[in-house]
Amino acid sequence: MPSDDQVRIHINRRLFDAPSARLTGTEILQLAGYGSDYELYLLHGEGDPTGGVLVAPDATLELKNGQHFRAIPGNANFG
């Protein structure tokens, strides 16, 4: 169970206990073991059809329990 200041979030469908309710995009990526060569997207639920909203590396987010994020390589080409 997370402590009072921890928040449970999902990154690429894996559950993580964030050490704080305020983290930067870079810190969220690092929590899941991803480096600066990845981009982070905030999803509106697990099955977000929009692909999510890009989170800048230096943007600080107020995390909420149950939030979903997607981390993908920054040089990914899906077309």
Image (cartoon, rainbow, N blue to C red):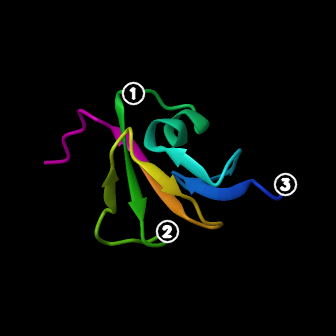
Compute the Cα span from label 2 to label 3: 24 Å
What amino acid type should be assigned to the residue bearing mark 3? Answer: Ser
In the rendered image of this protein, does residue 44 appear above or below residue 77? below
Lateral position of residue 13 relative to residue 74, left or right: right
Nearest-to-viewer mark from 1 and 3: 3
On-image quarter of the N terminus: bottom right
Q: Contact (CB < 8 A) between labels 1 and 2?
A: no
Q: Is 72 a magenta residue?
A: yes
Q: Amino acid at mark 1?
A: Ser
Task: Determine which residue is flagged by label 3.
Answer: 3
Residue 36 image point, x, y percent? 39, 27
Q: Position of residue 19 (x, y in %)?
A: 71, 44
Q: Position of residue 54 (x, y in %)?
A: 31, 53
Tell me the element at label 1: loop
Q: Which mark is residue 46?
A: 2
Label located before the other in sequence (1 or 2): 1
Gap between marks 1 and 2, in whole Å?
A: 23 Å
Amino acid type of the residue tagged 2 in the rendering: Glu
| Residue drawn 53% across the image and 37% down it | 27
Going from N to C along the chain, the mark reached first, 1 or 3, is 3
Q: Which residue is mark 1?
A: 36
Q: For the magenta stretch, what is the residue range? A: 71-79
28 or 72: nearer the viewer = 28
Q: CA distance from mark 1 to mark 3?
A: 28 Å
User: Would you say residue 19 sits in the magenta stretch?
Assistant: no
| Local SS, label 2 | loop
Residue 45 shows which numbered tag?
A: none
Specify whether 39 is left or right of 4.
left
Q: Nearer the viewer, residue 14 or 1?
A: 1
Quick check: 50 left or right of 67? left
